[in-house]
Image (spheres, coloured by chain):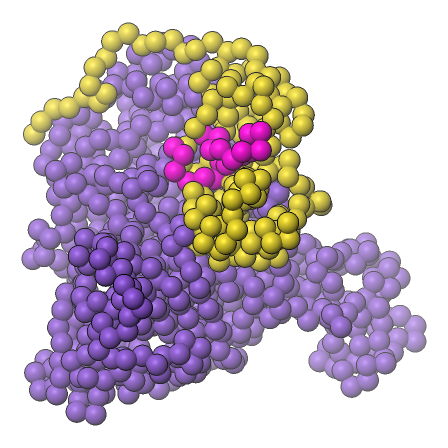
Chain colours: A yellow, B purple
Amino acid sequence: MSEQTTPASGGAVAAPPPVGTVRLTINGTAHEVQLAPWTTLLDALREYLHLTGTKKGCDHGQCGACTVLVNGTRINSCLTLAVMHEDDDITTIEGLGSEDNLSALQQAFVDHDAFQCGYCTPGQICSAQGLINEGKAHSEHDIREMMSGNLCRCGAYVGILAAVQEVVNKK
Amino acid sequence: MSTTNYIGQATSRVDGPAKVSGAATYSAEVHLPNLAYGYVVSSPIARGKITKIHADEVLALPGVIQVFSHENVPSVAWLDKKHQDQVAPGGSPFRALQSPEIQFSQQPVAMVMAESFELARYAASLLRIEYEQEAHETNLETQRAKGYEPGKGKTGYQPPPPPRGNPDKAWEQAAHRMEAEYVHGTQHHNPMELFSTTVDWHGEGKITAYDKTQGVFNVKNYLVGVFGLNKDDVRVVNHFVGGGFGSGLRPQYSVYLAVLAALELRRPVRLTLTRAQMFSFGHRPQPLQYVKLGTNPDGSLAALQHHVLHETSHFEEYTENIVTWSGMLYQCDNVKLGYQVAPLDVFTPLDMRAPGAASGSIALEIAMDEMAYEAGIDPLELRLRSYAERDQNQDKPFSSKKLRDCYHQGAAKFGWEKRTMAPGSMREGNMLVGWGVGGGVWDATQKKSAAKASITADGKLTVLSGSGENGAGTYTIMTQIAAETLGLPLEAVTYQLGDTDQPEAPLQGGSWTAASVGTAVQSVCQDLAGKILKLAQKQADSPLQDAKFEDVEFLNGQIRLRADHSQSVVIRDVLQSSGEAKIEADGSTTPNMPKQSQYSLHSHNVVFVEVKVDEDLGTVHVTRVVNAIAAGRILNQKTARSQVLGSVVWGIGMALMEETVIDHKFGRYMNHNFAEYHVPVNADIRDIDVIFVDEEDDIVNPLGVKGIGEVGMLGVTAAVANAIYHATGKRVRDLPITIDKLL
């Protein structure tokens, strides 16, 4: 038998950081939101702005479900703080198209059944849009490789490849 | 010309636009004012007890509301029975925060409640807890002698049948024989969506829980029992599940803790587990499997023995059907099957996609490959020589079994006849090419289900049944069934699910949703159709005046005589002129047991796999897969294909990378994150072909469907392992087959 205390040392507990006004431009709309500096862009979107299309799958940058576009470039929104993006143009899945007005990429995902449960899907689509913006993906191999930061536990990779390929080829 | 005969079509998902636009909301995405956020603290030790919790230190932080632990949570129902959900194994279900005792690593030991998620997380990271640690045992290897045959087992568990023939003597006297032990890594479901519950508090003892679950009714009954709430005061809702794979079959501690907090704090609560905590509530157990096979001189199986030992927890006796399938997949007169469990200091294992069968088929199907090489017979041919025309376990005929068609169509599509037998005999430059085969069998099950249908005067149909949508396509196939039954366009039909206010549907699992809920939806829509026909017949000069229900068909918005298509009425006109604002039908359906019990009801598949192994680096790529499936009628070619594609990805993951590793010194799963628990990514997956062979079956259920969520995974893992043997000559019996095992 042994004894253990976790976390190991106690001591003074630092007070939480203060909240301030943060200005974010999301999908072309300016928002003012009261946030502490420790709030990630992902939590700001989901919990403070109720833009829940962006998903949390790991909160550690390992799954890609939280992918959004910042100035057209895809990033994991769980690995960046909201306060760092006051001057940025942020696009989430809600900004790419709506249920009644899908983007070509969103429509291709529906047509090729490139998802099942749908939870990784907004991240897949934002990532694919970023990939298309980057202009680097040409072959099947490129797309597979450059979409591999977005996990899909349902295993819809065949459909994801087909959907992205269709849109890449049309460009 | 398009018709309203939607069943069997490759209809795109009706919930697709919501899913691709971010409009589909999951359990953590319900926006409620005044939410309190919870964050769970997990035990770092595997066994022992909590001696002190320094809650005061974090309670001093502004915005921290409460620290729940065994020291201050109210007592819940005393009897184990109240804690046992529909699919609980025997034993005493885990009760979070009810005792200082630690039963497994990562056990929830406290929950911090705060005004924001960030603050709850911060406070949880600071919360000091003192433990008295006791010796634990998490290594199954040490328990080989301690296995025992489980008792009754949980719902759906079938103890292996008694031995038949003389399996020992037959194996001794076999013309060719093999024996080997197989093991694969522990797996965790890891759906992409984190387990999360948002609870709305409506006043004293009244709640709505938005919970990630595969069964809203299972969760509701559990909450009512555990917290002693009034049945009418608890509602559980879940419109979309971000993947389940079995992880949501049982109510998890997340829903228990969230509801506890809401009841205590008397306000809405959200609790989301971390990815690391997703490894804390159930897993596919690691089985030690021993198989002995022998063949007759003609290559048919003379003897088959399959014995398994896997872990359970100390508090529940988890069982799954691992070996039973081995007694029915092939014709063999001398069979012995054994099944044992042994307790470890871990959480109770939990059904995970194709529970039991996925594990059992790895051992049996690699063993069949080894047998083929011992006997010098092509592995596919070996399977054909022991084709089971009858289920020998139950001594019953199959209701239908088109596995032979799977073998032939799959082999033709794959090009199996070009395979050369010798390992290492097919190569492309530096790449060793291997072709392997495997397959399996799964239950075709129908459960009692209820549904309700209503149609309004404008011709809009709404169908309700409290099933789930975890990606299998429930919204879509139910919409197709309802639309076809009433001859309405898909756009006129809304199917709603995932709410305990709806008619009760079974848990979403076991590949039975299409068969069970589909039958109920079809049945209530037929009842509704009967009512509409009666309204039509009330109209003056109705061309359907004397028609019986069987004499008419509902198609393309019309009711018409089958014998004379010119005699028809428009459904919408009937509704509008009837004067009724709404017509309803509800009811439930149950399996036709007198008919079904005479047969063995199963789906089958075979999988052909090509791998390319880099001779120098040992890297494996699964370059081609053909999965041929006999699963009765396919309701939707598109969503069904996706389920099978996903199953193949699962099988590849199980073969090559998935493994949760315990450091036995700590008794803890060490790789509890997506960076170290590897699941296949896009670059791991190449060409996958899916074949659904024609299989008619009017015994399994009126729709003739067998379900496809699990069967598609069977045989994939073994076929990959067999292909790797064919490529390299290395027989790896310890999965996953990582590079180190090939170098």
Q: Residue drawn at (28%, 87%), measured in percent from left and top?
A: B385
Asked if residue A162 shows in the view, the reply is yes
Dividing the image into 4 quarters, which one contains the C terminus of chain B? bottom left
| Residue located farthest toward the bottom when viewing the structure as drawn | B298
| Residue located farthest toward the right when viewing the structure as drawn | B540
Q: In the figure, A35 relative to B233: above or below?
A: above
Q: Residue drawn at (22%, 72%), measured in percent from left and top?
A: B424
Residue B367 placed where, x, y %?
21, 72
Residue B73 placed where, x, y %?
34, 26
- Segment colored magenta: A60-78
Q: Nearer the viewer, residue B722 or B431?
A: B431
Q: In the figure, B699 relative to B224: above or below?
A: below
Asked if residue B509 shows in the view, the reply is no
Q: Residue drawn at (39%, 73%), measured in percent from left and top?
A: B605
Q: Quadrant of residue B493?
A: bottom right
Residue B542 placed where, x, y %?
88, 75
Q: Nearer the viewer, residue B24 or B658?
A: B658
| Residue located farthest toward the front when viewing the structure as drawn | B429
Q: Does the magenta portion include A75?
A: yes
Dividing the image into 4 quarters, which one contains the N terminus of chain B? bottom right
